[in-house]
């Protein structure tokens, strides 16, 4: 290992903070701020769905672009530039009030969050592999939960001071800037450890791989409905502002150990079985958000959503890498494209259904069905032993 490189643990904490900023805050702070935007700006559920989908479209394009060879040697620069952009774009959301501005800003925020995800992961994972510390990968992914928890704590503080929705975005930008400084300090001069930049082979024509790509796309569609509208569901149920923040806090805290827990489960029951079971657990959470009345439903939904969706993202990518070990960058791109397409369609379909029906029951049922099918397909994708 390069003497100038930070320790694997320090680098993992850098990755954790980077994902907290770009994903936990940059992508998912929209969920707790959304009800205030809908009330004060008179946005419909369909409007909210379009804004969310613009973010996911940006993420899809960013992930596909990042998977190309053009970025080789520029990973560090692109990652830091994208982190800085994520902070600026969060702030800009609080300075605008039009649908057009929201859609453009959230599209760009999705793009830069994908760059951070891909390039920071390539830096961290290459050093972990070199040091024989792949066991620390779960900590890296825990950053998404950390960011969600941090954003919910911020929203709870703003709620008690009766701040408007724009303050949530402005403070998210400020916290993101602090996170950027922390990542710069923790990362040091680290670059990706492996210098192999040759072209990757085509993906293998493999039935199991095709099934996993399809399952991953359905997962993207299923999880994103509750991940986008959970706090709006709480608002519609009259739960109160502090309870809204509490539900989102629980979601983030459940996400912190989730990847570690499900990796352990995968070690015992197998990767494909762990993916399938975690999808079933998430089905219970998605259903609970609209079926169980009072505070119990949203809290259970938060725990089960946070406790699964980050881990399923990691398990799906892991399965893809195992099925196409010679083309890690290419399979990351294809899996993320499938996932991204599901994410883009999900909020629009859910928003239109919610607007037509007046609640989120049908949208959540649709999401639960997609997650159930995703789990079943992944279960059947496990390669048969020779």
Image (cartoon, rainbow, N blue to C red):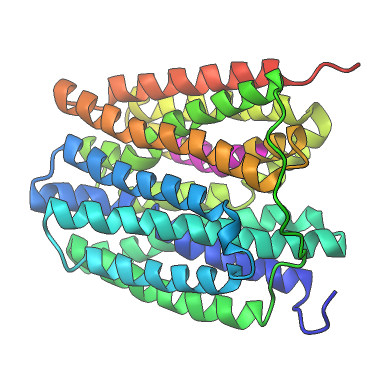
Relative to 216, residue 112 above or below: below
Residue 148 visible in the picture = no
Overall secondary structure of the magenta section: helix
Res 164 quadrant in image: bottom left
Q: Nearer the viewer, residue 359 or 316?
A: 316
Is 291 positioned to the left or the right of 181 in the image? left
Is 136 positioned to the left or the right of 52 in the image? right
Is 51 positioned to the left or the right of 358 in the image? right
Q: Which residues fall within the magenta stretch?
A: 301-315
Is 32 positioned to the left or the right of 221 in the image? left
The stretch drawn in magenta includes residue 199 = no
The stretch drawn in magenta includes residue 314 = yes
Q: Residue furthest right?
A: 386
Res 202 quadrant in image: top right
* Residue at 70% across, 29% down: 274
> Picture coordinates of residue 225 (x, y %)?
36, 33
Res 128 quadrant in image: bottom right
């Amino acid at each position: 290992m390069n003497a100038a490189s930070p320790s694997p643990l320090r680098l993992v904490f850098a990755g954790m903070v980077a994902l907290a900023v770009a994903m936990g805050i940059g992508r998912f702070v929209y969920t707790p701020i959304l009800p205030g935007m809908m009330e004060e700006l008179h946005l419909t559920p369909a409007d909210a769905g379009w804004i969310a989908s613009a973010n996911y479209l940006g993420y899809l394009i960013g992930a596909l672009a990042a998977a190309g060879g053009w970025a080789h040697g520029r990973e560090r620069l692109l990652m830091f530039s994208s982190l800085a952009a994520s902070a600026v774009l969060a702030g800009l959301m609080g300075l605008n009030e039009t649908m057009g501005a929201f859609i453009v800003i959230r599209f760009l925020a999705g793009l830069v969050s994908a760059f951070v995800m891909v390039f920071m992961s390539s830096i961290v994972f290459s050093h972990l592999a070199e040091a024989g510390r792949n066991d620390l990968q779960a900590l890296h992914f825990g950053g998404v939960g950390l960011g969600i928890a941090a954003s919910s704590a911020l929203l709870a503080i703003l709620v008690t001071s009766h701040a408007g929705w724009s303050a949530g975005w402005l403070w998210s930008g400020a916290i993101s800037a602090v996170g950027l400084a922390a990542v710069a300090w923790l990362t040091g001069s680290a670059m990706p450890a492996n210098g192999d930049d040759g072209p990757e082979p085509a993906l293998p024509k493999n039935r199991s791989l095709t099934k996993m790509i399809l399952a991953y796309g359905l997962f993207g569609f299923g999880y994103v409905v509750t991940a986008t509208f959970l706090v709006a569901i709480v608002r519609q149920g009259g739960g109160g502002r502090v309870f809204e923040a509490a539900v989102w806090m629980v979601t983030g805290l459940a996400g912190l150990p989730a990847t570690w827990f499900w990796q352990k489960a995968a070690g015992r029951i197998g990767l494909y079985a762990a993916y399938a079971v975690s999808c079933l657990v998430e089905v219970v959470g998605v259903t609970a958000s609209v079926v169980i009345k009072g505070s119990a439903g949203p809290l259970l939904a938060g725990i089960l959503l946070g406790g699964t969706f980050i881990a399923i993202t990691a398990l799906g990518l892991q399965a893809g890498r195992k099925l196409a070990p010679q083309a890690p960058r290419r399979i990351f791109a294809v899996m993320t494209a499938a996932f991204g397409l599901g994410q883009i369609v999900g909020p629009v379909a859910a928003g239109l259904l919610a607007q037509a029906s007046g609640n989120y029951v049908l949208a959540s049922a649709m999401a639960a069905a997609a997650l159930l099918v995703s789990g079943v397909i992944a279960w059947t994708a496990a390669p048969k032993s020779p």
